[in-house]
Amino acid sequence: MHILICSNGMPAADNATRIGGLLAKASRAETTLLGIAEQPRDDAPLREALEMASQALQAEGVTPRIEVGAGEPIQQILHETSARAYDLVVIGAERKGNTGLYWRSRKTYEVIKAIPPPVLVALGDCSSLKRFLVCTGGKRFIADAVLLAGKLAAAAGASVTLLHVMAEPPAMYADLVRLEEDLDRLLESKSELGMTLSRQKADLESMGVTVEVRIRHGMVLEQVFREAREGDHDLIVTGSSQGTGIVRHYIMGNLTRSILNRSECPVLVARSGPHAGSSSIFQSLKRLFGTSGT
């Protein structure tokens, strides 16, 4: 594994070094520290900060390679990830407010959308990575994100909770609710949700990861953070999709953006491949309901 830890020499970058170091140590990853000086006057203090970060990593058994770039940060990170293959990019994120669409630095969201590798946003005071919460969405296109989470969890000795949040269905679909509340029955069912969660669980267990499947009903964001708090999770895993069209880019959905805005623990935004247009919630309900009694 090859991990890129990005730093601009500011305090938020300390989180990226610390959390990136935890994963690098656990996975024995080849590690690169990328410093970016936006102005010439930033170069000397940045190099000093990178040297201190390198010493902190070396104290934990991680020996990083140091790279220094100058100019616009997103372009520098894009250049680095295009020149070398990275399995994971770790960045810090300053909090700018608590209203509007973007509560963190706008560059945080732009990096996630711009670069090919998965991005771990180092948030909060995380000191260990032992419990991962994976927001699966119950769809096949999130499979790569689940596998990445499993790879990191296996290296770190962490457990994984697969979380699917379902909107409260109309009363006529009461059988569906009962199916979802009976996890064993759901995982053995032929429904799309059941088969997907069962496959994800099996894939993670094949890596030696302890897995729990959780189903919740209600508003997705509220239920994600309730599960994160009640389960004492150290890391939230969510996804982004590859856009269609001539220009390659990634789409960060409202849920992922809202999780980044509000989270007090690290958030891993894992890549998903392009997928067919999703059906409406009622079409999905009908398919699931139609197979729940078979």
Image: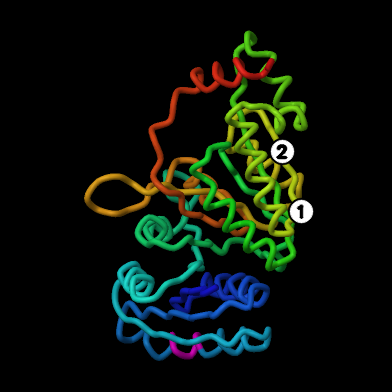
> Could you say which is closer to the camera, residue 12 or residue 170?
170
Side of 69 relative to 119 (left or right): left
Which dot marks residue 214?
Answer: 2
> Around disc 1, counting alpha carbons within 10 Å, would you say few (fewer than 14), some (14 to 19), or many (20 or more)?
some
> Could you say which is closer to the camera, residue 272 or residue 50?
272
Tell me the residue at 49%/80% (across/down): 32
Q: From the image, tell me which residue sits under label 1.
A: 210
> Around disc 2, counting alpha carbons within 10 Å, would you say few (fewer than 14), some (14 to 19), or many (20 or more)?
some
On the question of residue 160 being in view, the answer is yes
Which percent across, then down, holds residue 76? Answer: 33, 73
Type of the residue with mark 1: Thr
Location of residue 125 with respect to 225 vertically, above or below: below
In the rendered image, which quarter contains the C terminus? top right
The number of numbered badges drawn on the structure is: 2
In the rendered image, which quarter contains the N terminus? bottom right
Location of residue 44 with respect to 152 vertically, above or below: below
Tell me the residue at 48%/60% (across/down): 118
Type of the residue with mark 2: Arg
What whole-number distance in Å separates the C-alpha atoms at marks 2 and 1?
A: 13 Å
Task: Judge whether residue 263 is colored magenta.
Answer: no
Side of 174 relative to 2 (left or right): right
On the question of residue 91 being in view, the answer is no
Assign a secondary structure to mark 2: strand
Assign a secondary structure to mark 1: loop
